[in-house]
Amino acid sequence: MKKIVFNLILCGIMATTMTSMMNRQSVMTKEDGMYVVNTTTLAKDVRGFKGNTPLKIYIKKNKIDHIEALNNRETPQYFARAKKGLFAKWTGMKVAKAAKGDVDGVTGATFTSKALKENVKRGVKYYLDNK
């Protein structure tokens, strides 16, 4: 009986470890010499005006190369305004600076701007902690 319980505990530990490793792989990958951080699971509690605003953050040599918006339910015109106003500010920025979140939002797209800023902040923090 003790052996069965031990094996069950061991299987549980292994499953938890494998799930953790799979989550890390799905959050951060490497493509074309760049780290790519997907904030879908990192910022699932971060909401814009109509819901989550997940991003892919492309990082090369400790600088943000570019950011790609993933599917979201934000109002297209406001999301486009926030995207245009914010993504350019982060391009070329060192990740240490981006992690502080010191980027001005976009007027008229306040909720979306705040959500995008938090996604980037969490994404670059994850990169810094796991690269």
Image: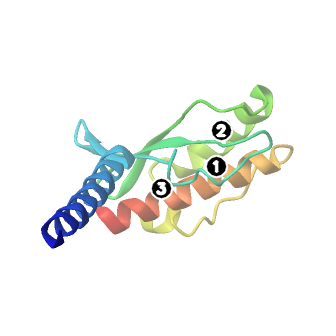
Q: Nearer the viewer, residue 48 or 86?
A: 48
Residue 3 % position (x, y) = 13, 68
Residue 61 % position (x, y) = 28, 55
**Dot 3 crowding, Cα within 10 Å, few <14, some 14–19, many 20+:** many
Q: Say left or right for 16 vs 86.
A: left
Under circle 1, the secondary element is helix
Residue 86 % position (x, y) = 64, 46
**Is the residue under label 1 in contact with that under label 2 (CB below 8 Å)?**
yes
**Dot 2 crowding, Cα within 10 Å, few <14, some 14–19, many 20+:** many
Please tell me the numbered disc located at residue 123. 3
Amino acid residing under circle 3: Gly
Amino acid residing under circle 2: Lys
What is the quadrant of the C terminus in the image? bottom left
Q: How many marks?
A: 3
Q: Which of pointers 3 and 2 lies earlier in the amino acid sequence?
A: 2
Please tell me the numbered disc located at residue 74. none
Q: Nearer the viewer, residue 15 or 128?
A: 15
- Residue drawn where x is 74% and y is 34% of the image: 74
Q: Residue furthest right?
A: 108
Instruction: Confirm whether residue 26 shows in the render.
Output: yes
Q: Is residue 91 above or below residue 13?
A: above
Q: Quadrant of residue 7?
A: bottom left
The type of colouring in the image is rainbow
Residue at the disc numbered 2: 83
Residue at the disc numbered 1: 116
Q: CA distance from mark 3 to mark 2?
A: 16 Å
Q: Say left or right for 90 vs 28.
A: right
**Dot 1 crowding, Cα within 10 Å, few <14, some 14–19, many 20+:** many
Amino acid residing under circle 1: Leu
